[in-house]
Every structure is written in structure tokens, then in C-alpha cells.
């Protein structure tokens, strides 16, 4: 009985192992390569799959999701013979599990080496400045070459990114100095532009202020002149409205004579000839009053050039020439 039990146990174990090998569960977004006696048979997709135990075997399980692989920095020489270190990141996806298994031994290593060689070819035709400013161009060129080369491997390269481009330390220092100089230049230009704009605005303000001031002065002068003209018209109208006679005008003129004579510098007066006619009415009256009154020459010049007549003697000198001649003012002592 014991040998039979042992055989049964062995048979149960073999059946269990066979069932395990027969039923294969493949996760989503994965694939498995099945070989029969070392030869490719089929590709198992996601889900429950049945294989022949002890005859079919699973060669490789491949993840079909997009993969991200960063590559270490690689030294690359530019066209101007400068060595730069470039870090790259590859985004790829397996589209054919069979080709990825049998067409290349290690597609990860193959992609890395292809990336390095292609990057050196591309950077070798660019100088440092273009390399630093042409990342999109380099990415597009890398992706085109890698996608074409990896297509037969069952790999699709979705994106290639340059993570970092590190020039030599001396070049970095020179670039920083150049950048600092450019910023100082831009700052100086902006400062000069600000000063220029400020001066222009100040000049415009002063110009506008001067124009407004001149307009104000012009209007003020016009208003002042208009006021004076109005005052003259008012006085003229008042005089004519009062209908003054000749005696009143003569009396008003005599009141103005002391004001005209004020000051030591007034040695010569210009008296209009029309004043003589106005003073004729008062000359006789002042002549009858006797001494102490000024004398007036109301006649013309004699044949010998002397005055026609003098007024009475008084404290002042003769002051009026009815012909409009210049009359000299003299200081004489009063007669007692």
C-alpha cells in the first residue's frame, strides 16, 4: 500500500505542476514570448492563456508601457573644439514584443549607445552658442534618428530631452561675465533713456508754462489797457458832461504847475501853446492882484526877439510861453 500511496502523491504533484504550467496569467499592458523546444511559437497577450506544459516555455515578459530611461552625462566635442557634458532622457515604448526579444540582444543598451553616437554627430556640427540655444533642434534630430533605427527592434521613441548641457568651468565664467556686461549695458541705456525722457518732459513743461505765462501777461496787459481806456473815456465824458469853462481849466492848470515843478532836476518845461489861450482869462485877474503872483507872457515875441510883456513881480519866475516854446525855470528870492 505504501508504494501506491507514494505514486499517487507523485502523480498529484505532477498534475498540480502541469496545471500551473498550463495556465498563464499575463497582466495588463504586458506581453510574453512563448517558445516550443527553443523556437518562437506565439506571443501571449494580457489575460488568461493556456500553454502546453513541459513543451511550451515562457521566454520573456515585456512591459508595453512607455518607459523613461535617463542616461549618464556624455562628453561631446562641439565644432569650436569645446567639450561639453550632456545628460539625455529617453521616452520609449515597446510596440512589438517579438522584435524587441529577437532583433536586438539588449534594446536599452542599444538605445543608449545609439543616442551617444547620434548626439556626438549632431553637436559636432554646432558651435557652443548654437548648442546652448538649439535644444529643440537637437531633440528633434535625435528623435528622428532613434525612431528610424529602433523601428526594426519593435521600439518607438516618443521623446528625447536634453536634461543638462554643461560647458567647461572657464567658459561658464566667461559667459557669466558677458551676461553681466550685457545687463550693465542695458541698465545704462535704460537710465539714459529715462534721463532723456525726463529732460524732454521738463522742457515741454517749461515751454507750456512760458506760453501760458505769456498768454496771461498778454491778457492782463489787454485788460489793463482796456481799463485805462475806459477810465480816460469816463473822465472825458465827465468833463464834457460838466461843461467846464475856460476859467476852470486855467485854474486846474495852475493847480498842476507845482506838481510839474517838483524835483530839483526839472529845469525845462514844455508848455503847449493852447494853454496860453486858456490862461488869457486869468492873466488879467492875477495882474490886478499886484505882487506875489507869477507873470505870464501872453503876447508874442517882439521884433528884437524879446518877450512882448511880463507879468507882475512875485516869488516865482515866468513859466508859460503861449507859443509852446521851452521856458526855463529859475529859483529867485521873494521880493518884500
Image (cartoon, helix red, strand yellow):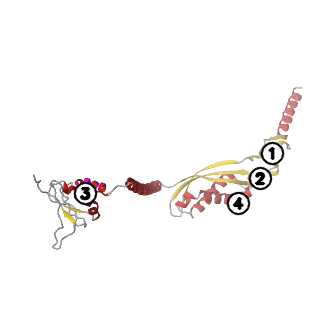
* Residue ID for mark 3: 282
Q: Badge 2, how many Cα within 10 Å: few under 14, some, many 20+?
A: some
Pointer 4 or 2: first along the chain: 2
Location of residue 154 by image quarter: bottom right
Local SS, label 3: helix
Main secondary structure found in the magenta portion: helix
Residues at discs 2 and 3 in contact (Cβ within 8 Å): no
Nearer the observer, 45 or 297: 297
Q: Badge 4, how many Cα within 10 Å: few under 14, some, many 20+?
A: few
State the extent of the magenta-drawn residues as a range.
Answer: 252-257
Local SS, label 4: helix
Q: CA distance from mark 3 to mark 1?
A: 158 Å
Q: CA distance from mark 4 to mark 2?
A: 15 Å
Nearer the observer, 322 or 219: 322
Q: CA distance from mark 2 to mark 3?
A: 141 Å
* Residue ID for mark 1: 57
Pointer 3 or 1: first along the chain: 1
* Residue ID for mark 4: 148
> On the rendered image, what quadrant is the N terminus found in?
top right
- Residue 258 locus on image (x, y percent): 22, 53
* Residue ID for mark 2: 96
Amino acid at each position: 500500500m505504501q508504494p501506491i500511496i507514494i505514486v499517487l502523491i507523485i502523480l498529484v504533484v505532477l498534475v498540480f505542476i502541469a496545471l500551473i504550467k498550463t495556465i498563464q496569467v499575463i497582466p495588463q499592458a504586458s506581453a510574453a514570448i512563448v517558445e516550443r523546444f527553443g523556437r518562437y511559437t506565439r506571443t501571449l497577450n494580457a489575460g488568461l492563456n493556456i500553454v502546453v506544459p513541459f513543451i511550451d516555455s515562457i521566454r520573456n515578459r515585456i512591459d508595453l508601457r512607455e518607459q523613461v530611461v535617463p542616461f549618464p552625462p556624455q562628453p561631446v566635442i562641439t565644432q569650436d573644439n569645446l567639450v561639453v557634458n550632456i545628460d539625455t532622457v529617453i521616452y520609449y515604448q515597446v510596440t512589438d514584443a517579438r522584435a524587441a526579444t529577437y532583433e536586438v540582444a539588449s534594446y536599452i543598451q542599444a538605445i543608449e549607445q545609439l543616442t551617444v553616437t547620434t548626439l556626438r554627430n549632431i553637436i559636432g556640427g554646432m558651435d557652443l552658442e548654437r548648442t546652448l540655444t538649439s535644444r529643440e533642434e537637437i531633440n528633434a534630430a535625435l528623435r528622428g534618428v532613434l525612431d528610424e533605427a529602433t523601428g526594426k527592434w519593435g521600439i518607438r521613441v516618443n521623446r528625447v530631452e536634453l536634461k543638462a548641457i554643461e560647458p567647461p568651468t572657464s567658459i561658464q565664467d566667461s559667459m557669466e561675465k558677458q551676461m553681466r556686461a550685457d545687463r550693465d549695458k542695458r541698465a545704462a541705456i535704460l537710465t539714459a533713456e529715462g534721463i532723456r525722457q525726463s529732460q524732454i518732459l521738463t522742457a515741454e513743461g517749461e515751454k507750456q508754462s512760458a506760453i501760458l505765462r505769456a498768454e496771461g501777461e498778454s491778457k492782463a496787459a489787454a485788460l489793463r489797457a482796456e481799463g485805462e481806456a475806459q477810465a480816460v473815456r469816463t473822465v472825458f465824458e465827465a468833463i464834457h458832461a460838466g461843461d467846464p469853462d475856460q476859467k476852470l481849466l486855467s485854474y486846474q492848470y495852475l493847480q498842476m504847475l507845482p506838481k510839474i515843478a517838483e524835483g530839483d532836476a526839472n529845469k525845462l518845461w514844455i508848455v503847449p501853446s493852447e494853454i496860453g489861450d486858456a490862461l488869457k482869462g486869468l492873466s488879467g485877474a492875477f495882474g490886478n492882484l499886484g505882487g506875489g503872483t507869477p507873470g505870464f507872457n501872453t503876447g508874442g515875441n517882439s521884433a528884437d526877439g524879446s518877450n512882448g510883456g511880463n507879468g507882475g513881480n512875485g516869488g516865482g519866475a515866468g513859466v508859460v510861453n503861449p507859443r509852446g516854446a521851452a521856458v526855463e525855470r529859475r529859483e529867485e528870492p521873494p521880493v518884500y
